[in-house]
Amino acid sequence: MIQTIELTKKYGDFTALDKLNLSIKEGEIFGLLGANGAGKSTAINMLLGFLNPDSGKVQINDIDATKNAKDARKIIGYIPENVNLYPYLSGVENLDYFCRLAGLKYSKTELQDFLASCGLQSEANDQKVSAYSKGMRQKVGIAIAYAKKAKVYLLDEPASGLDPLASKELSILLKKLASEGATILMASHDIFRVREVCNRIGILKSGILVKELYAKDVSANELETLYLKFMQN
Ligand SMILES: Nc1ncnc2c1ncn2[C@@H]1O[C@H](COP(=O)(O)OP(=O)(O)OP(=O)(O)O)[C@@H](O)[C@H]1O
């Protein structure tokens, strides 16, 4: 569960996020849609405890993440737009390394299973990551969170730069994680992908959540029209 209550962040006199109220349940995929500078990354950084809010609160499952960010991060998987891996290690070696950093030791078979569950083709397991596509690196990034048994996934612009097939695979993977009980928030400006993968969508404009809706209630075209209307007003 992800909950933000009146979450506010200012940079000097500028309010980047203004009293954000979000409540995302287990099994839900929430899409935070917004233009460049809307405040999406600011919100994610506060969920992760990398940024302190000026006011308001973040709750991750039963953890008050504003007070115990370190505990909250143990159950959060964060997948940035560009997943940083060690290029001269293979997918399995990267996963092993990041698991060990989190205090987890898995057998090679278990590591391979995590990668397979996240859609990486088995032939890639032992290839150096420097030869991976962006979509493949992202699968390893998600596998790191999956192996950590993350309960909450935060993704910043996950579909950006992916080709249509990789983007479709990402949607399938996120839906699978949600069906297994994960709570997922993805920040994006990709209206089509957000409409396709998310159950619920919030439109963020200049730090203010101006609209929340269920994806099933709008077509992609209707969402685009609505989004553009909010951006233009
Ligand atoms: N450290 C900072 N100091 C001052 N202003 C900042 C800082 N970080 C972000 N901002 C401003 O806060 C606003 C929100 O930025 P943020 O990065 O959260 O937006 P975003 O929705 O993630 O945008 P993008 O899609 O471009 O990543 C922007 O106007 C940005 O310029």
Image (tube, grey):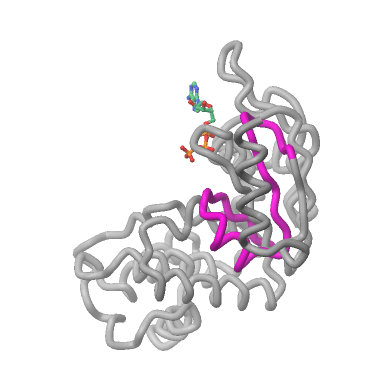
Q: Where is residue 26 in the image (x, y as percent from the top left)?
A: 76, 65
User: Which of the two residues, 129 or 229, is positioned nearer the viewer here?
Assistant: 229
Can residue 69 be found in the magenta stretch? no
The image quadrant that residue 18 belongs to is top right
* Quarter of the picture holding the N terminus: bottom right
* Quarter of the picture holding the C terminus: top right
Residue at 62% across / 39% down in the picture? Answer: 43
Residue at 60% across / 69% down in the picture? Answer: 149
Q: Where is residue 227 in the image (x, y as percent from the top left)?
A: 64, 45
Q: Position of residue 47 (x, y in %)?
A: 64, 43
Residue at 43% across / 79% down in the picture? Answer: 115
Q: In this rendering, would 188 be left or right of 4?
A: left
Q: In this rendering, would 157 be left or right of 123?
A: right
- On screen, residue 72 above or below 144: above
The image quadrant that residue 44 belongs to is top right
Can residue 201 be found in the magenta stretch? yes
- On screen, residue 113 above or below 25: below
Q: Where is residue 176 in the image (x, y as percent from the top left)?
A: 61, 78
Residue at 48% across / 67% down in the picture? Answer: 142
User: Which of the two residues, 130 or 81, is positioned nearer the viewer here?
Assistant: 81
User: Which of the two residues, 99 or 232, is positioned nearer the viewer here?
Assistant: 232
Q: How many labels does the image show?
A: 0
Q: In this rendering, would 200 be left or right of 85?
A: right
Which region is colored magenta?
A: 183-210
